[in-house]
Each structure stands twice: as C-alpha cells, then as structure tokens.
Amino acid sequence: MSHAAFAKEIVARLRSRTNSARQRATAGYYPSAQENLGVSAPHMRAVVREFKPSLKGKSASEVIALAQAIIDCNTLEGRQCAYELLMSNKAAREALDATTVRRLGQGIDNWASVDGFCCHVAGRAWREGRLSDAEIARWARSKDRWWRRAALVSTVPLNTKSKGGKGDIKRTLAVCEMLVADHDDMVAKAVSWALRELVPWDEKSLRAFLKKHEAKLAKRVLREVGNKLRTGRKSGRQGRHICRPYDQPLLSRPSMEAITSAMMDTASSAGVCAPMSRPTGHFTRSQSLGAAPRSSAVCVSWAYLGLEPIVPYLTCAGSFLSAGRMPSRSNSALYPSPRTCVKAGMS
C-alpha cells in the first residue's frame, strides 16, 4: 500500500467516528485552517491502536513518510494520530533530526496541534538529544506565535514525569526567559505551563525567576504559577487537598492512617459541632475556630466524590472515627468514609 493510500485509509477511519456536536463545539475552541473532524481523543487513540501493528517491520524512513502523508491530508485529528503513530515506533523516533522535526511541524496553527507536536515529537526529540538548544531558541525567536509556543511546550516533556521527564530547570528557564515579555495569550499560557512543571523539581529557582521577571511577566503567568506554588493547583482552589503553608514544599501523598488521623484531629478541634445552616465545600479549623492560619489548615473536602457535605455531620463522623469504626455503606451520604471523601497531596 502506498503512503498516500495508507494516509487516506486512516483519515477515512477517523471520519467514520465523526461527532457533529463535538465538531461544532470545538470549531471555536481551537480554530484552524485544518479540517476539524470532531473525533474525540479516545476514538483517535483507538484508530492509532488499530493501525500501529501495520508499522511493524517498516523502516524508519517509511514510518516518517507515512506520518508526513497523514499530516498532508490536513485534518486536525489526522495530525494527532500521525504524531502518536510516529512516536510509537522506536526506529522512527531515533531517526528524527531537526529538519525532519521542522517538516512534521509545518502547518501547526492552533494550540491543540502545537501541544500534540511538542509533547509527542519535538519535546522528546530535544530531551533525547536529537534537537539542539539552538534549534529551540530559533523557534522562540520566530515571528509565528505558534512556533514561539512550540519552543515553550517542548520543555514540558523535559519535566513531566508521566512523559518521561526528569527535571531540566536550566533549559526550561532559558526558554522562558526569552519569552517573559511576550504577552500574546497563547504564548503567555505556555510560559505559565512550562513554569508550573518546574514546581516539583526546584521551587527555589522558580521563585527567584518570578521575582526577577515580575515586571515583565503577564499577570496570568504570575497568578497561575503563584497559585501552583501556594496550593499545588493552577486554579488556587484548595478544597480537594490537605493544605500547606506557602513557603513549605508540596506534601507527599500520606498513608490512609495519616488521612484518618487528620480527620479525627479536625473533628476533635471542632468539638461538638451543630449542623450548619448552609453546607460548605470544605471545613477548616481557621474558618470555625480561628485557631490556625488558613495556610496551615487541615481541609476535609466532600466535593471529591460529590457526596453529601461532611461538615453538617462532622460530629457524627468524628464519633465514628473516634470509636475506630468506618461508616457503613448505607449511611455513606451522612457519614462518608475518609477513603472516599478526602484526597490529600497533589492531584
């Protein structure tokens, strides 16, 4: 089968999974000159799994040519599938060079395509030494907003553990420093993302970077990275977490015994608590007793599972825990167990 025929077969398979409602909804979400087929990520990955075995035994140059043929069909979802198929083939992955990577990136004109290209292809190639620092710096100086975003998003595979990253503070900050004054929204969002990925690796260097460039960075970047440092989340919401002081490192995920102990401690500090007239999303010592600042409060969240609020029934839940008993399944709405209603540490 020719490369063009193979590409057309994949695109035809994607078209068969078109969802017109998704097509309409995403048209404005990531507008593009490429055709939007309205195929969801799980369906795209199903197509990738279906065609992946057909790449076995093919040379690296053939796999790269097939990926390029799919990209040339000019569909959003086809491009994503091409990147995933390419990176699933070790020989093709190891044959990438700067010229090939640039060619595979031609036509990226929306954030979804940029992010797929960088997380699957460019970022991994850079991490594995097949793209030079100078090449990424060239992208960062581009007049095209999407290539500037690509330079930043290529740092994500350096630092994200789920993508194989082991932390590369120096190169990440070098790229971000080139674009600190770029307030294009697509670029600023990528700066924020790149910096947030450094939180688990080196908070001290990250704080120093923010302080140094505070006057130049977009407010979005300062807000989102600051929230990540304070709460472990971009949004700054703390309801699903046991909180930590701003100047202390992120909590590691504690054991079930530690979570139970935290709940008992909260219930004990609250004393005999009458049901509140209006349920709230989470309960903290600082809110009820003023005994500790919010940053060191222990938060008990009910939103994690969408169960009934735990706060109005805190006394009953505390009694169960004090007695060493877990609430029964039949009473889970009134007395949700700590395992099912508390999430601690980072998500």
Image (spheres, rainbow, N blue to C red):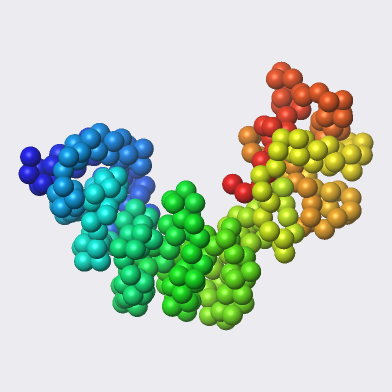
Q: Which is nearer the eye, 87 or 319?
A: 87
Relative vertical location of residue 71 with respect to residue 269 in this rendering, above or below: below
Q: Which residue is drawn at 45% across and 70% down?
A: 171
Q: Which residue is drawn at 59% across and 64% down?
A: 202
Tell me: 90 left or right of 245: left
In the image, residue 200 lies at what x, y percent? 58, 58
Q: Which residue is drawn at 41% across and 67% down?
A: 152
In the image, residue 76 lies at what x, y percent? 27, 51
Locate residue 111: give its quadrant: bottom left
Tell me: 23 left or right of 166: left
Q: Name the quadrant of the N terminus.
A: top left
Locate residue 57: give its quadrant: top left
Q: Which is nearer the eye, 175 or 125?
A: 125
Look at the image and tell me whether residue 71 can be seen: yes
In the image, residue 213 lies at what x, y percent? 56, 79
Relative vertical location of residue 17 with respect to residue 154 in this rendering, above or below: above
Locate residue 175: give its quadrant: bottom left
